[in-house]
Amino acid sequence: MKRELTGEERERYSRQIMLGPIGEEGQRKIIASQVLVVGAGGLGSPVALYLTAAGVGRIGLVDSDFVGLSNLQRQILYTTSDLGAPKVDRAKEKLVDLNPHLQLETYRIRLTEKNVSEVIAGYDLVIIAVDNLATRYLLNEACFKAGKPLIEGAIDGFCGHVTTFLPPEGPCYQCLFPKKGDYVEKNGNPPGVIGYVPGLTGALQVGEALKIILGIGEPLVGKLLFFDTLNMEFKTIQYTRSPACPVCGNKS
């Protein structure tokens, strides 16, 4: 038997319920969904806020970092009073305040080969919101093995990109960005970024997540949406599964 929306839920989500592709049935799907967000920084902040506001019922948030002063220029979950605090702790307080019906699980850890499968196991899909390649490759392999959708987003200065991986269909992250030998993360200076770019990128990632949850629209599977905000250019780049890919190349 389908659970009816409460009066509060109908009012809280009224502006999206009135959209034909969503309606009350779609809102029930959103409330029943479970999404893992890996990273609670520049990308993770808008991702978590928009998922929470939309009514996603259970959100997992993974981040081992603490709030620093340089974060505040773009990581919109945090304020000056949060300096020095664990990001996931402050994020939980603010997200639950935004939507008290939210079930929020926090993981103040770094994902590794030993824990990644266990962490992603309880979620319907995973959103990448980190700034390092090692975690991207790790999540790509784990999600394809577990058959879980994975939504990628990245930023570079005034530019960004978004794409979606939907195992067993389509290519994976390693098809798009081949891993060369034993990958070692470079520890150089972090790249520059203007704050609105992760905001835009994160919002697009949430759009991809909601399309998958609702079963509507056309996710960016095999398509990389790249945008350059200085010139306000958006373009979609097609890419395909690589037969030589060790993650998905031999899958049918």
Image (spheres, rainbow, N blue to C red):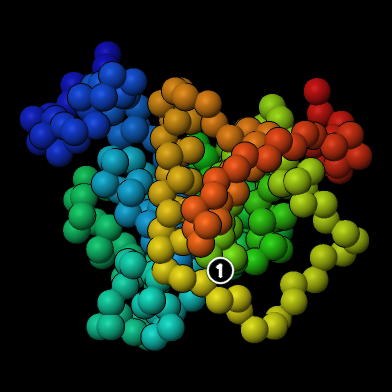
Q: Residue at x 49, y 53 (%)?
A: 232
Residue 171 percent location from the top left of the image: 74, 35
Q: Is residue 85 above or below residue 166?
A: below
Quadrant for residue 187, please give it.
Answer: bottom right
Q: Is residue 175 above or below residue 189?
A: above
Circle 1 is placed at which residue position?
157
* Left or right for 237, reference 81: right
Q: Residue at x 48, y 30 (%)?
A: 212
Of helix, strand and loop, which one carries label 1? loop
* Left or right for 74, reference 79: right
- Label 1 Cα crowd, 10 Å radius (few <14 / some 14-19 / many 20+): some
Residue 184 percent location from the top left of the image: 80, 71
Quadrant for residue 90, please give it.
Answer: bottom left
Q: Amino acid at mark 1?
A: Gly
* Left or right for 212, reference 144: left
| Most distant residue in the left direction | 7
**Count of marks, rendered view:** 1
* Left or right for 225, reference 242: left
Residue 111 percent location from the top left of the image: 61, 62
Q: Residue at x 80, y 23 (%)?
A: 252
Q: Quadrant of the N terminus?
A: top left
Q: Residue at x 72, y 55 (%)?
A: 137
Q: Is residue 76 visible?
A: yes
Q: Nearer the viewer, residue 188 or 91?
A: 188
| Most distant residue in the front direction | 231
| Most distant residue in the top direction | 1
Q: Is residue 25 visible?
A: no
Q: Is residue 115 above or below residue 211?
A: below
Quadrant for residue 170, please give it.
Answer: top right
Residue 163 percent location from the top left of the image: 60, 43
